[in-house]
Structures are given as structure tokens and as C-alpha cells.
């Protein structure tokens, strides 16, 4: 295959924008063509989309913004209320950061989401990508973005062989993204297209999601195939390269699901660390969650049910958590003050408890398989 000519930025912009107009997906946070995007909805969506697929976010977004329709309502909410609305999305630090950002928007910006990437970077938990996405999509500022989809598109477009997570490569990718969005701004100014910048960054992300996919990219359907230095080659499958990850740390959580009169006991996790501040069924991370442990820690006499424990694994960013779940019921004792709360799944009071996805799975597991009793 003959070498391709140097990348023509205006050509990339001219090819990608019409493609986006034809293929853009409807999303609950995405404005219709010709309409201005709601900055708050864009901010919420970008927080949710970090490390989470669009299809998953769509299931949570509308409920979240119906509970907290603007920065003021989110800022006024309690942390537990916010975490409960976020429950199931994972990576709960994002919810705390978004909550803190909303408070800053109210306290420092009169409740209006800042218009520039520089101002947005001043909000708690807002990094360069989120600032660029909100500033460009909501306000048309030619600010670059670099998420996983855009990184993949640019690495293939420029045939970047160096691992994309290295600082030097990141610096280059940000520069390439900045050059492209400036070219989009120039095209918009020349053609009178006021949506050029707003659409271009979304188009890059959409291209990575729909065409320039991690596996088996659809190079023949790509609007940038003539300019791409990897299109139709083995390089397209190989790129982008990343530094090999360390093996996740394996940990075990022993769970004792304790029932009393149809309600189950839940305890709150520590304020720091994994799933900080979330609620779980009584869990031991340094040994067996047995009747002796329940008596000492909780003050309860528990009859543990017969049968093999429920077992499953849950992967987080750096850990592989193995859960072993036993069930039991109280036969005496008194719950120590502050040790937990009793809740019936399916009730309003239970829905107000923020629980992580593995706890949701455990609740479903114990409700379906109550087990048989054995001696204390």
C-alpha cells in the first residue's frame, strides 16, 4: 500500500461532520440538531460516562436528573441521597465529585455551570477531559477532549505505536486533539456553522464508539479511511497500545446476610476506601463471618442456614473481590448501637440506602435462596 499523504486537518473535519449528522445517536443528554445543549445535563452525563458504557448510563441518567434537575437541587441533596441515586453505576467517587462540583457551581458561579474549560477545571473532580467536553458541547469553546474512544481514533489515524498511557504520548494526543478542534472552529467560522465545534468532539467520540471500535474496526465504513494511516491494515487491530496492566489484587469478602422478621441487616462501610460510605450486609474481610463473629461484632445470636455459600466474583479497577455469602436469622441478642439498620428489600426505606452492585446481587441471591437452618 503506498504511503498516505500528511494528514489534512480541514479534510478530517469536512469528512467527519457530515458523517456525524447522518449517524449521531439520540441520547437523553444530547441536544437535537439546532438546539443548545443543557450544560448541567452534559456535566452529569460526562461524569456518568467515565469508565461506563453509554447503554448503561442511559438506564440511570433520566432518573438521576429527575431527582436532581439542576445544580442547585443536587447541591442541596445529602450525600447518601446522591449515592442512592447513583447506586449500580459503580465508581462512586464520581458521584461524590459531581456532588461537590454542584456545590461549587452554586457557591461560586450562581448556580450556572461555568462556560470555559479553564473555569470548569476549577470545579472539584473535573479534569481536562470533562472540562473540554462540557465547554465544547455546551458552549462551543474549541477545547480538546481525550477519552478512550478519541484516543483510539487518534492513535490509529496517526499510526502512533507508542503506548498511549505514557506521558509523552498523552501530550502528543492532546496536541493532535487540540489541532483538530481548532480546525473545526475555523471551518465553522468560514462556513457559518455555529455547531461545528459542538458537533466535532461528539463526532470523534461517536466514531470511536460505532466504527473505530476496539476489536474489528469497520475501516470500510469509516469517513476518515482515506486519511487514516492504519485503515485496512493489521495496525488498526493492534492499536492503540497500552502498558501491560498489573494483575488485580485478589481479596475475599465473607458476607453473613442476617434476617429478622422479613428484614435484613445492613451496615455502612467506612468513609474512605472501596465503596466508601455505601451500605452492605455484614461483611468480614479478614476471616470467616460466622456466628461467633456476629455475636462479638454485632451483639446478635445468629442461627446460620445450612447449604453451600453463594459464591461470585466482582472486578473493580484494581481488585478482584471474591464474595462468599451465607444466610442466617437472629435467635437472640440485641443489635449494638450504630452497628447497622434493618431494611426490607423492595421498600422505600431500602431504596434510600446506597448499595453497590455486588450488594444488589447479594440481596437478590438471599431473597431467592433463604436456605435451611443449622445449629448456632
Image (spheres, grey):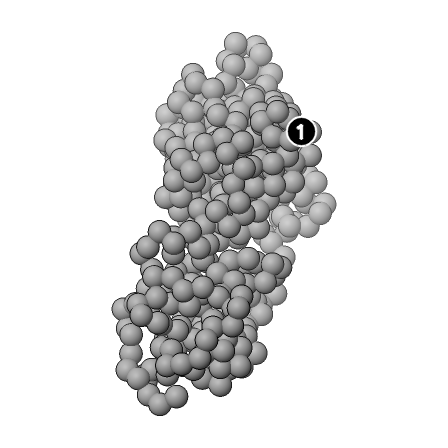
Left or right placement of residue 219 versus residue 170 in this view: left
Label 1, residues with CA under 10 Å away: few <14, some 14-19, many ≥20: few
Identify the image quadrant of residue 105.
Answer: top right
* 247 versus 356 height, above or below: below
Q: What residue did someone put label 1 on?
A: 108
**Residue 53 rendering spot, x and y as whole percentages:** 44, 46
Residue 197 left/right relative to 346: right
SS of the residue under disc 1 = helix
In this rendered view, identify the residue nearer to me: 155 or 249.
Answer: 249
At which x and y percent is residue 243? 63, 57
Residue for point 44% across, 55% down: 353
Please report the residue visible at 33 percent of the width from the left and 55 percent of the height from the top.
Answer: 347
Q: Is residue 3 visible?
A: no
Residue 193: image location, x then y, percent: 50, 13
In this rendering, the count of numbered labels is 1
Q: Answer with left or right where residue 239 lies relative to residue 350.
A: right
Q: Position of residue 41 (x, y in %)?
A: 48, 31
Q: Quadrant of residue 303?
A: bottom left
Amino acid at each position: 500500500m503506498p504511503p498516505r499523504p500528511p494528514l489534512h486537518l480541514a479534510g478530517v473535519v469536512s469528512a467527519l461532520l457530515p458523517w456525524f449528522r447522518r449517524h449521531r445517536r439520540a441520547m437523553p443528554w444530547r441536544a437535537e440538531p439546532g438546539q443548545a445543549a443543557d450544560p448541567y445535563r452534559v456535566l452529569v452525563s460526562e461524569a456518568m460516562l467515565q469508565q461506563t458504557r453509554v447503554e448503561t448510563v442511559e438506564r440511570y441518567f433520566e432518573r438521576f436528573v429527575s431527582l436532581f434537575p439542576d445544580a442547585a437541587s443536587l447541591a442541596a441533596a445529602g450525600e447518601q441521597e446522591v449515592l442512592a441515586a447513583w447506586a449500580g453505576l459503580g465508581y462512586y467517587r464520581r458521584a461524590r465529585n459531581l456532588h461537590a462540583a454542584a456545590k461549587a457551581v452554586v457557591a461560586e458561579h450562581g448556580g450556572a455551570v461555568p462556560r470555559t474549560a479553564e473555569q470548569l477545571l476549577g470545579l472539584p473532580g473535573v479534569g481536562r477531559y470533562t472540562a473540554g467536553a462540557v465547554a465544547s458541547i455546551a458552549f462551543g469553546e474549541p477545547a480538546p477532549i481525550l477519552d478512550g474512544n478519541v484516543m483510539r481514533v487518534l492513535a490509529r489515524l496517526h499510526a502512533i505505536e507508542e503506548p498511549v498511557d505514557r506521558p509523552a504520548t498523552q501530550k502528543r494526543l492532546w496536541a493532535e486533539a487540540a489541532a483538530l478542534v481548532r480546525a473545526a472552529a475555523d471551518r465553522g467560522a468560514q462556513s457559518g456553522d455555529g455547531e461545528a465545534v459542538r458537533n466535532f468532539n461528539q463526532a470523534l467520540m461517536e466514531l470511536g464508539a460505532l466504527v473505530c471500535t476496539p476489536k474489528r474496526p469497520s475501516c470500510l465504513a469509516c469517513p476518515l479511511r482515506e486519511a487514516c494511516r492504519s485503515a485496512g491494515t493489521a495496525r488498526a487491530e493492534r492499536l492503540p497500545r497500552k502498558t501491560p496492566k498489573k494483575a488485580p489484587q485478589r481479596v475475599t469478602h465473607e458476607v453473613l446476610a442476617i434476617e429478622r422478621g422479613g428484614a435484613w441487616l445492613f451496615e455502612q462501610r467506612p468513609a474512605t476506601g472501596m465503596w466508601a460510605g455505601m451500605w452492605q450486609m455484614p461483611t468480614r474481610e479478614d476471616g470467616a463471618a460466622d456466628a461467633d463473629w456476629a455475636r462479638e461484632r454485632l451483639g446478635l445470636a445468629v442461627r446460620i442456614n445450612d447449604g453451600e455459600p453463594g459464591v461470585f466474583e466482582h472486578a473493580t479497577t484494581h481488585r478482584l473481590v471474591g464474595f462468599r455469602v451465607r444466610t442466617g436469622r437472629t435467635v437472640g441478642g440485641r443489635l449494638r448501637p450504630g452497628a447497622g439498620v434493618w431494611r426490607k428489600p423492595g421498600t422505600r426505606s431500602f431504596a434510600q440506602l446506597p448499595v453497590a452492585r455486588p450488594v444488589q446481587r447479594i440481596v437478590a441471591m438471599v431473597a431467592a435462596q433463604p436456605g435451611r437452618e443449622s445449629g448456632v
